[in-house]
Amino acid sequence: MSQRINPSILSADFANLQSELDSIRSADLVHVDVMDNHFVPNLTMGLPVVQRLQEVSPLPLDVHLMIEDPERWAPGYAEVGAYSVTFHAEASTDPVTLARGLRDIGARASLAVKPGTPIEPYLEILHEFDQVLVMTVEPGFGGQAFMAETLPKLLLLDAERRRHGLDVWLQVDGGVTVETIGVAATAGADTFVAGSSVFNGVPADRIAELRAAAQQH
Ligand code: DX5
Ligand code: ZN
C-alpha cells in the first residue's frame, strides 16, 4: 500500500519558507497548519500566505484548517489550488455539503477529528471524503507527545474503507516520529504528518528515516 510523508511547516523557519520548502522535496505533500486563535489557542497564517506558498511550493499543499466557520473559509483554499483541504468535524455545521463543494472546486476533501471526538458518526459519510485526519495530539501546537489512545479510530476507519472498497487516505497528525509511525501504520494510517521530527534535524534524512520506519509495518 502506498504511504505518504507530509512534513508540517509549523516547525519550519517562517522567515525562510521558500528554502524550507526546498529542503523537503523528497516528501510527498507539504502540510500547512492554518490556525485562527479561536478553534485552537494559537495563530499561524491565512489565505494570502497559503496562496503564495502554493505558487512557490515544489510539492502539493495539504492544508489543515484548525479554524471556526470552515464553511466560510475552506473553499478559498481550494480556489487558490491547494491539493487537499482538511476541515474539522467539530467546527463544521454541514460536513457533507462542504466536502462536495471542495471536490467541485477540484480539491481533495478531508475531514479531521480531535483526539476526543468519536469517529463512528462519520463512518456512514466516509465516501464523501478523500482523506480523514485522525489527530494524534490536541491540535494547536507542534512538539507534543503521540496519543496512542486515538489508534482504535484508525482501525475502525480502515475496516470501513475495506468493507466499501473506498480509496480514502487515513492521515495521522501530531507526535509522529520514527518511534510512533509504526503503530500508526499498523492501525491503518497511510499518510503521516511530521513537524518537529522532520525540521529538528536534516529534513531529507528525517523523511527517509520516517519512510523506512513506516514501511516496516
Ligand atoms: C498541530 C498541527 C500539526 C503539528 C504537528 O496542531 O496540526 O500539524 O505541526 O507537529 P509535530 O509533528 O511536532 O507533533
Ligand atoms: Zn496539522
Image (cartoon, grey):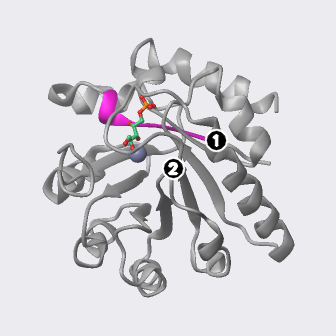
**Measuring 31% from the left and 35% from the top, which residue is drawn there?**
10
Q: Is 118 displayed left or right of 190 in the figure? A: left
SS type, badge 2: loop
- Left or right placement of residue 129 versus residue 144 in this view: right
**Picture coordinates of residue 175, whole percent (x, y):** 51, 30
Ligand 1 rendered quadrant: top left
**Within 10 angstroms of label 2, few (less than 14), some, or many (20 or more) residues?**
some
Identify the amino acid type marked 2: Pro
Residue 84, given in percent of the width and then of the height, sits at 45, 61
| Residues at marks 2 and 1 touching, judged by CB atoms closer than 8 Å | yes
Q: Determine which of the numbered discs, if any, sits on residue 115 in the image.
A: 2
Residue 53 drawn above or below residue 102: above
Q: Which mark is residue 149?
A: 1
The percent coordinates of residue 81 (x first, y second) are 34, 65
Quadrant assignment, res 38: bottom left
Left or right for 5, reference 143: right
Q: Does the magenta portion include 7?
A: yes
Above or below: residue 190 compared with residue 169: above
